[in-house]
Amino acid sequence: MADLEAALSVALQGAKGPGALVPVLQRLQGELGYLPGPALEEVARRLGIPPARVFGVATFYSQFSLKPKGKHLVRVCLGTACHVRGAPQILAELSRQLEVGEDGLSRDGLVSLEEVRCLGACALGPVVVVDGEYWGRMTPAKVTQLVRALRERGKGEA
Amino acid sequence: MERLVKLRIDGQEVEVPEGTTVLEAAEAAGIEIPHLCHHPELSPVALCRLCLVEVDGRLLTSCNTPVRAGMEVRTATERVKRLRRLVLELILSDHPLDCLTCERNGSCELQRYAYEFGIEENRFVGPDHARRELPPREDNPFIRYEPGKCILCARCIRVCDEVQDRHVLDFAFRGFSTQVVTFLERPLTETDCELCGQCVAVCPTGALTEKERRFKGREWELERVETVCPFCGCGCRITLHLKGGRIVKVSGGYRGFRLCVKGRFGLTFVHREDRLKVPLIREGDGFREASWDEALGYVAERLLEIKEKYGPDAIAGLASAKCTNEENYLFQKLIRAAIGTNNVDHCARLCHAPTVAGLVAAFGSGAMTNSIDEILDADCILVTGSNTTEAHPIVAQEIRRAVRRGGTLIVVDPRRIELAELAHFHLRQRPGTDVAWINGFCHLILEEGLWDEEFVRERCENFEEFARAVERYTPEYVEEITGIPAALLREAARAFGRAQRGMIFYSMGLTQHTSGTDNVLAIANLALLTGNVGRRSTGVNPLRGQNNVQGACDLAALPNVLPGYQKLSDREVRGKFEAAWGVKLPEKPGLTVVEMFQAALAGEVRGMLIMGENPMVSDPDISHVAEALEKLEFLAVIDIFPNETTRFADVILPAASFAEKDGTFTSTERRVQRLRRALDPPGEARPDWEILCELSTRLGYPMSYRHPGEIMDEIASLTPIYGGISYRRLEGEGLQWPCPSPDHPGTPFLHKDRFPRGKGRFHAVEFREPAELPDAEYPLILTTGRVLWHFHSRTMTGRVEGLHELVPEAYVEINPADAGGLGIRDGERVRVSSRRGSIELVAKVTERVPQGTVFIPFHFGDQAANVLTNPALDPVSKIPEYKACAVRVEPIER
């Protein structure tokens, strides 16, 4: 796996000892989009940390994912303000239209759907963030629009 | 001197050493503090919070709070009690309450505290408490894991990391979902786990249990018998837990809880249906059942017939390193007194005969000089020719711990064995070139002035001759012979030379060579030169392979000595035994193992008695052994199972296993320990000592003992090193010989002020090539050894399903460079041939072996590595060269 090797060398550059683990995992996820098992094993070996410990750290922090992510990240705010303005319905609608499975990934693998607690944009609630772009005052109709836009983008890239 | 600290606990004045924790101080004062995550052998983590106490009014966890002078500790205030109850409720909110069918019902620490605190219902259980619903996991042969019962105390994680040094377990996930898992939640068998089960041993609840015990008995129904593990020479004291005549589980071990996979999970073989249960007499191609009376009468008759016709020297006996001291003593007594020959030997010939020969010459005593519990304090450990992790797991644990504490580890071994991975120096010598590198070490240590001049002057002799001999072993010359880079040799030698407490461990890799005795002498030179003998945490430590190989040697199942290594040639010694035994003893030393089979082939030995040995797997050049056994006029075998050797027998006598008899074993550290009868032997099987008494009596030399304790009394009366040993004194930890008198405490390390021979003697030894070198026809060197999961010829471990599954057949390790050249792929079946035969097995392509060397584990009767090995003998100790012979590996036509 040439990609993996390249990503590992970027992630491990200058890293030494157990203390470097979290930044290495962050860089590695930055390169690969997620943390595949073989990559974690290599990180463990090269940093001299037991693999079980690396697995523990990788599964502790919510920022790390051991599963592949979609090309696009859609985060739905479920903070109090968004919640009272109907965020759960927005989440359900997104999940239905994108056909999101238990792993949080849409069936076509294009989108990862995540829940977050309060993004500090309560005035815009319910809020959905698509790859860093804020969509405010969401409604089920806007969800359809959003899904269409994501699929268009997907085609453009394919 | 450690400083003492005074404090008050619950008003009681307590004085403890500095560094003691409050919890330990309280325990020392007899005040109990509840705790769950704390374990006396593990580092404190203060996870469970149950051990809260008030210190000067503040709440602290007592397990990780060190004592301070003047501290006022209160362990049972209302506040503390209320909080402990809260803590317990929180722990229990995650725990299923299925105590009815839990294996730990009655020994669960959580259950005990729930009862003591009277917690009947729980305020905290909610929908998030999902962990307790997780399904159990049983995806390995021995250990059951129920994540729901886990209280996240991390004892398993710590024992795996701190004691076993594997760290295959850790916490993963977060919050309510937190679990102890392996990397990627893999089955234990796909991790570095050695299945030692120490995690099970320390688990406070039913989260980790032995699969085998499930529904076989609740704690309070189990009978407990303290005895000794029957596998390797580590000598772990174990407790068998029994119900209804079955071993339900095994506990105990080194420091009370440390065992290896074989000791903890590998004892179920005693219950196998195919145990020998009645005496068998050959009839045609098969066997028929016989009464003891008939079978013993027949054995006696045939042996007497042979003695009559050809003389006593036409009979030979193989005693057993698996049997007790008392049985080995009786065996050699039978051969010597009842038959009248010294033709008695056992498999020690095939393992540490060079140790006995070499160390007796150098020191005057041929046993491990120091003890296992001294390893931790050594600052440099040299391991050579010992795959300690797999052959002596408990010793390896201590070596790993010593390294974690900062000790330097030097491994000299052609293979990249597990210890090599944590070694500071790994020197990979060409097999059979040990004298060269050891002389090289001595050369460098002399050259750099790192030797112990005072020790050499005061306590040694023959230094000059030795010093002259090592002169030419310069690093460059050594590199030429051994292939060890000169610079690496130099650094490693320096590290050993500088050590304050250097400990040397070796085993078969050093002894099983035609130069075996020289190798041992060279090692003894190194220890003498550096003054690493006669002190704690130093010494020359040959690791003995079998549970009682030390004892079998001590009690003279050897052709050239009488019990306690007393010289057969010494008229006074002989006189003492003749008086005690009431017979005239033969003076001529007898035959050794390999010589016996050669003599059988030559028609000089006609009858044999074999007790608990399986030469058809364990001896070199097996085709030859088969011919010899075939040629015998009479062969009687005493064993617990039918095996490759019983096939050749005329009479098979069924014996009791270790769990079915009383006696003693002597471990590698010379520790004599009590074996206790826990079960009845199956069918009509009887303890070997009883069989020997009956047989001897029928041979016209009556033997009668009511109990093995009486045999030990006789041993003590005739054997100075066992002189102070009696069953009365063997409760608990046993005694380490020499123990010359009833008030002697035993000897943890040898040669303190003087050597038994007076001065330690240096020997000038020169490198000699192994008997067989690779050539065009047989271009590779074969070396053999053990794996962790099996023991010797697998008569026992092959019958433990889980162990069998782990490694069901033999394989050959071959370096990728060699495999590539031969067109051999990993996992492919290959043929390995030597001048003596060939076997077929699976190739494991791995860098564990260096280029030019292949390795085969010797346990497997169907694909016996010893079909290939060379019976060429070391001229002094008569050990065959198992560890180096020339072979060819070829793919099997597809």
Image (cartoon, helix red, strand yellow):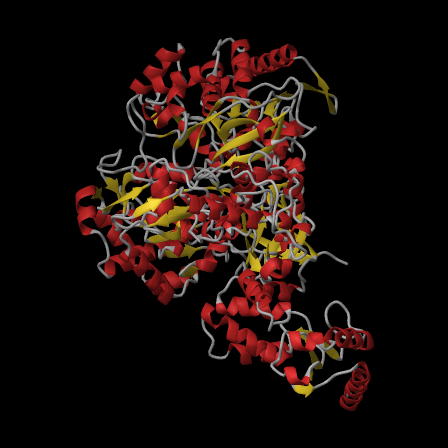
Side of B320 where B269 appears, left or right = right
Which residue is more in the foreground, B775 or B299?
Answer: B299
Q: Which quarter of the figure has residue B603?
A: top right
Q: Is residue B812 above or below residue B683?
A: below
Q: In screen coordinates, is B569 left or right of B467?
A: right
| Residue at 28% across, 50% down | B68
From where the camera sits, is residue B281 visible?
A: yes
Horizontally, residue B662 falls left or right of residue B453, namely: right
As drawn, the residue found furthest toward the bottom would be: A156
At 48% from the left and 42% from the top, the residue drawn is B258
| Residue at 65 percent of width and 57 percent of height | B128
Q: Residue at x 57, y 30 (%)?
A: B241
State the image quarter where residue B265 is shown.
top right
Q: Position of residue B283 (x, y in %)?
A: 73, 19
Quick one: B245 or A156, which is closer to the camera?
A156
In the rendered image, is residue A79 in sight?
A: no
Q: In the picture shown, does residue B509 fall above or below B11?
A: below
